[in-house]
């Protein structure tokens, strides 16, 4: 692989053992995927931040590292809200370990912004090269913004934060971003009134068909929140890191894309609206959780409006980034008044608090997919309106 002088200096150990090892990680990754060189990244998102997922072994590894991030770098959600962890039912031993993980990342120069929606708070532009690791954030950055990132593992993302580069392969290369197949609905008109929950259900169904390929949707007109829900669910049931929607997502509109993608010659999968509707159910649940991925401003406002003047009778959890919480205190107060809880830094999947709930209703296709496997709870999918109705009736 082509390396420059600064890479050679890092490899010689001139900038410390941690940087040397981190560059070795990136070079090894590049060799696996036949990358010709390393390219600079403008931001990094590091997963592996919850004590629930990395445990003592991960903490020990982090504490042994000694270097500072050279590009803006931030974290995926952790296992608890940094402020209200005891209110959420997190035990003190877990909280102590989680704090140690945060301290380790802070010492490495990683910002303690713990969210899967960094794109609401960082300037990320079309064509930017990133090294992000949370699957829904990767799908959003690639598809909705037109930035370029592979789905990094925790160690490779951290290596990119400390070196400022990533190997140039996969979705960093334009020809790999062209679609592999087309997806249509058997009744496109049915999608006209779909909200994020229905798009999440579509993603839940489509992800299983698509695997790790790049799909091109035709006949849909989703806005950004719906695209977010679609991509998050497809990344969960498949390994979709990039998708396009005809005339909607940015790369689907550029001339290179249009001339390089012969629509009529591609495999087409038609998804039945009845299969999307079948993801929804009516089972009894013990709790409701929304905010997977963390809510946008519009989504937060919708939740606040729907809960306004009502009282929840079941535990109702709302997950957002810390910045969203701080920027919209009025909406948080409206939600608090209903008895629902708004938590930052964490989520229903990476927090151990969900593991004891038994059954949970959510409006997220991604959470619907992850809750059984990662938290051992029975999930129910519903629209945000249904979530509020079930929690308050
Ligand atoms: Fe985000 Fe947690 Fe969902 S990290 S995408 S809220 S599983």
Image (cartoon, rainbow, N blue to C red):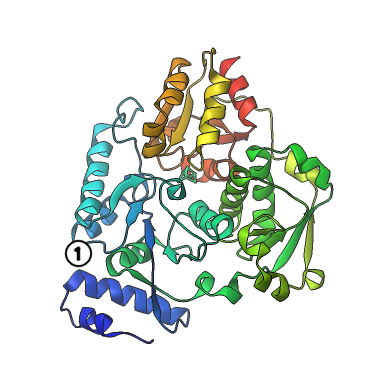
- Note whether 359 is above or below 235 in the view shown: above
Tell me the quadrant of the picture where the N terminus can be found: bottom left
Q: Residue 261's image quarter?
A: bottom right
- Residue 382: percent from left, percent from top: 64, 32
Q: Is residue 167 left or right of residue 290?
A: left
Which image quarter is the C terminus in? top right
Image vertical order of residue 169 relative to residue 187, above or below: below
Q: Quick one: 239 or 58, which is closer to the camera?
A: 239
Q: Residue at x 17, y 74 (%)?
A: 15
In the picture of the structure, the residue carrying the numbered disc 1 is: 67
Q: On screen, 300 above or below 107?
A: above
Q: Is residue 291 above or below residue 206?
A: above
Residue 385 at x, y = what percent? 63, 26
Can the viewer see residue 239?
no
Q: Could you say which quadrant of the image residue 19 lies in?
A: bottom left
User: In the image, 349: left or right of 146?
Assistant: left
Residue 149's x, y, as percent? 48, 65
Please identify the residue farthest to the front as the structure is shown. 255
The residue under the point 46% across, 50% down is 119
Q: Nearer the viewer, residue 194 or 88?
A: 194
Q: Nearer the viewer, residue 129 or 183?
A: 129
Which residue is depicted at the point 73% across and 43% down?
276
């Amino acid at each position: 692989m082509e390396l420059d002088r600064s890479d050679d200096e890092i490899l010689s150990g001139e900038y410390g053992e941690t940087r040397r090892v981190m560059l070795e990680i990136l070079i090894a990754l590049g060799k696996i995927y036949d990358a010709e060189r390393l390219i600079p990244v403008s931001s990094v998102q590091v997963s592996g931040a919850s004590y629930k997922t990395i445990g003592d072994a991960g903490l020990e590894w982090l504490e042994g590292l000694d270097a500072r991030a050279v590009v803006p770098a931030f974290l995926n959600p952790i296992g608890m809200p940094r402020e209200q962890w005891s209110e959420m039912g997190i035990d003190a031993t877990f909280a102590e370990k989680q704090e140690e993980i945060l301290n380790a990342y802070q010492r490495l120069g990683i910002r303690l912004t713990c969210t899967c929606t960094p794109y609401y708070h960082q300037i990320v532009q079309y064509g930017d090269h990133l090294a992000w690791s949370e699957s829904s954030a990767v799908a959003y950055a690639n598809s909705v913004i037109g930035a370029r990132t592979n789905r990094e593992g925790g160690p490779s993302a951290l290596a990119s934060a400390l070196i400022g580069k990533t190997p140039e392969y996969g979705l960093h290369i334009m020809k790999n971003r062209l679609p592999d197949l087309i997806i249509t609905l058997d009744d496109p008109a049915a999608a006209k009134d779909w909200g994020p929950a229905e798009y999440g259900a579509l993603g839940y169904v489509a992800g299983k068909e698509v695997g790790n390929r790049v799909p091109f949707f035709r006949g849909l007109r989703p806005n950004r929140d719906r695209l977010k829900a679609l991509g998050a669910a497809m990344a969960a049931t498949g390994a979709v890191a990039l998708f396009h929607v005809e005339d909607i997502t940015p790369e689907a509109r550029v001339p290179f894309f249009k001339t390089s993608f012969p629509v009529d010659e591609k495999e087409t999968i038609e998804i039945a609206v009845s299969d999307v509707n079948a993801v929804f159910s009516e089972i009894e649940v013990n709790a409701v959780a929304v905010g997977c991925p963390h809510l946008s401003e519009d989504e937060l406002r919708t939740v606040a409006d729907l809960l306004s003047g009502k009282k929840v009778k079941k535990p109702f959890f709302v997950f957002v980034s810390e910045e969203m919480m701080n920027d919209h205190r009025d909406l948080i107060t409206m939600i608090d008044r209903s008895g629902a809880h708004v938590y930052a830094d964490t989520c229903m999947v990476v927090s151990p608090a969900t593991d004891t709930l038994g059954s949970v209703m959510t409006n997220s296709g991604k959470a619907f997919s992850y809750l059984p496997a990662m938290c051992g709870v029975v999930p129910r999918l519903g629209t945000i309106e249904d979530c509020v109705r079930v929690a308050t009736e």
